[in-house]
Image (cartoon, rainbow, N blue to C red):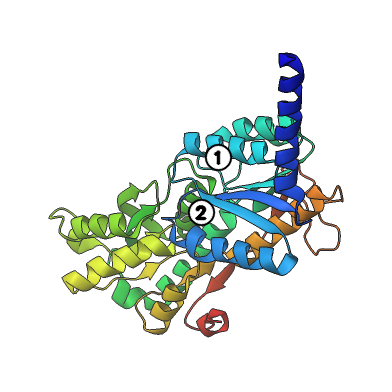
Amino acid sequence: MKKVLLFVAVILIGLGFAACKQDDGKIVIGANIYTYGDNFMNGVVRPELERYAEEKGITLDIVDSENDQAKLNDQVDVFISKGVDALAINLVDPAAASTIINKAKAADIPLILFNKEATEAGVMATYDKVWYVGTDSAEAGVIQGEMMVADWNLNKATWDKNGDNKVQYVLLKGEPGHPDAEARTTESVKAFADAGIEVEQLAIQASTTWNTGEAQATMQSWLSNTTFGDNIELVISNNDGMAFGAYAAMEEANIFLPLYGVDALTEALTMIGDDEMNGTVLNDGVNQARATLDLAINAAQGKDVTEGTDWVVKSDGTKAVRVAYVAVTKANYQDFLS
């Protein structure tokens, strides 16, 4: 009798999960943002995920992973236990992709990784129902670097404070090991070398959360540094959020230096218009969000993930949809304010 009751209980639990998922007939996608403390992810990507889910008539169960990979692992377990139709996961740690992929594979649930690309070699090939939506990490750095080189050549007479024909810069770097942070850092500076312009790195500081407050404190420290503070000629930031902190510190010190970011957040666009920032790079979070859900919806329905869309999955083994970056300057910032 006990065995019969146990069997019935298991069936009822299973039906409970199924009912939870299917009672309104909508596709259910379990999603996360690695931290709501990230200006770009929480201010651009998350709102568009929620808006687009409503437009597409699906249920989006979205959570904050609070920059904790272990917490994200547990959240994925909960999504799986609920019987979601697909997963849309913004990794906390790009080196932990295999953990999430293995969980999705064991449950036979389609998985879209977005914004943070797996760094483990070959991991995307271990599951036929996993794809990535993001950008070409190097492209933002290349574009940012090209903007800075062009502006340096135009303004060298005033920007080269010590007249040594060399760019003395400080750099606010994002999360160490994050593909975007590493590529933006490398490529933005490499653009000067490619143009035959010498550079000198005075300081660099990484932030695990790409945080405005941390960047402000860092910039305050750099400006007051008795060894190099007066020699800074250029401020490079891996994202707009940290650029905001750098500008706040410069404003406090009444010292204004060329400043470049990445993301094209609304505040950055306004600052470009007010000559408080020199440029940024559009990180198209809106289309990243839309592509993520388009792929997840198609995968949940057993269709080709790009069916009925304009997205293209790369055939280079990355299984990635790449959303292009765009340079934003004083000449075109108004085009992106809407």
Residue 157 horizontal/vertical position (percent): 32, 77
Q: Secondary structure at mark 1?
A: helix
Residue 287 visible within the image: yes
Give residue 311's quadrant in the image: bottom right
Quadrant of the frame with the N terminus: top right
Q: Tag 1: Cα neighbours inside 10 Å, few (<14), some, or many (≥20)?
A: some
Q: Amino acid at mark 2?
A: Glu
Q: Secondary structure at mark 2?
A: helix
Taking 96 as reference, is 292 above or below it?
A: below
Tell me if label 1 and label 2 are in contact, CB under 8 Å.
no
Residue shown at 76% from the left, 30% from the top: 11
Residue shown at 50% from the left, 42% from the top: 92
Q: Which residue is mark 1?
A: 75
Residue 130 horizontal/vertical position (percent): 73, 41
Give residue 256's quadrant in the image: bottom left
Q: Which residue is mark 2?
A: 187
Nearest the viewer among 35 and 306 is: 35
Residue 183 horizontal/vertical position (percent): 52, 49
